[in-house]
Image (cartoon, grey):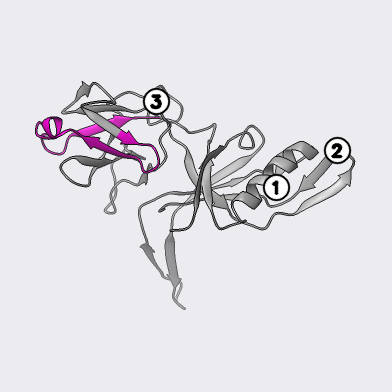
Amino acid sequence: MADFLEERFCDLIRYGSSWQDDYAVQIVKTAGGQEYRSLTHPFPLRKFDVSYLLTRADTAAQLLALWHRAHGQYAGFRARCFDEWSSNGMTGTPTETDQLTKKISSTIWQLRKWYGTDGTAGASGYPYRVIYKPVSGTVKVAVNGTLVAGPGANWTVDTTTGRITLSAGVAATVVADNVRAGFEFDFMVRFGSALVIGQDYPNHRSAEGVILQEIIAP
């Protein structure tokens, strides 16, 4: 995989910036006007536009420093979205039963966040986002609906992969893959464009098209 910087880039994703979610849908249109659509994968893909904030030279300098550390569009890094950072809705306080995790093995479980579960899913099922970058100190785990004390002897979490490791004793009590978790999380992103900064006048800078693109797989 490409390089990843375990640093959070959050100050630029604030009020005035924008973001959008999209899905990888392939659409083929026939000459007769019919459409054939296929869903490549079930993961929402977020894109941030943070151009608006580059009005001060010091802000531009911070962004430029990260751009160089990341070698432009090559390396990823963490980003905090102030509209969505929790497993409990968008910004609610996380609880241990918020989200069903994915079983990797009997002791290892991957954090996920599901979407649209307040209604009935279509044939493609509910979409979800794999959470690779939970925030340290915010993860809670429940097995069979009951909070499990930790992190510690019962379970640990790797905040660079989003994987929970249960102790053998706790893993042995799991019924019907019922391991759930709550957490705060960061988005994995990379720069999605070249970085162009305009020198408008002293101590002020402008930029257009500064895009952060979510990485859906490390």
SS at mark 2 in the image = loop
Horizontal side of residue 160 vs 13, given as left or right: left
Q: Is residue 157 above or below residue 48?
A: above
Q: Are marks 3 and 2 in contact (CB under 8 Å)?
A: no
Task: Using the image, tell me which numbered label, if any, was put on residue 64.
Answer: 1
Horizontal side of residue 47 vs 201, given as left or right: left
Q: For the residue marked with disc 3, what is the amino acid?
A: Gly
Residue assigned mark 2: 203
Q: Whole-percent x and y of residue 101? A: 26, 39
Q: Whole-percent x and y of residue 190? A: 55, 51
Q: Give the spatial CA distance, label 3 vs label 2.
A: 38 Å
Q: Is residue 196 above or below residue 51?
A: below
Q: Nearer the viewer, residue 75 or 119?
A: 75
For marks 3 and 1, the one nearer the N-term is 1
Q: Give the spatial CA distance, label 2 vs label 1.
A: 15 Å
Q: Are marks 3 and 1 in contact (CB under 8 Å)?
A: no
Task: Using the image, tell me which numbered label, if any, was put on residue 78.
Answer: none
Q: For the residue marked with disc 1, what is the amino acid?
A: Leu
Residue assigned mark 3: 137
For marks 2 and 1, the one nearer the N-term is 1
Q: Whole-percent x and y of residue 66? A: 63, 46
> In the rendered structure, which segment of residues is drawn in magenta?
157-183
Which image quarter is the N terminus in? bottom left
Q: Nearer the viewer, residue 128 or 152?
A: 152
Q: Residues within 10 Å of mark 3 (few under 14, many from 20)?
A: few
Q: For the residue marked with disc 2, what is the amino acid?
A: Asn
Horizontal side of residue 31 vs 130, given as left or right: right
Q: Residues within 10 Å of mark 2 (few under 14, many from 20)?
A: few
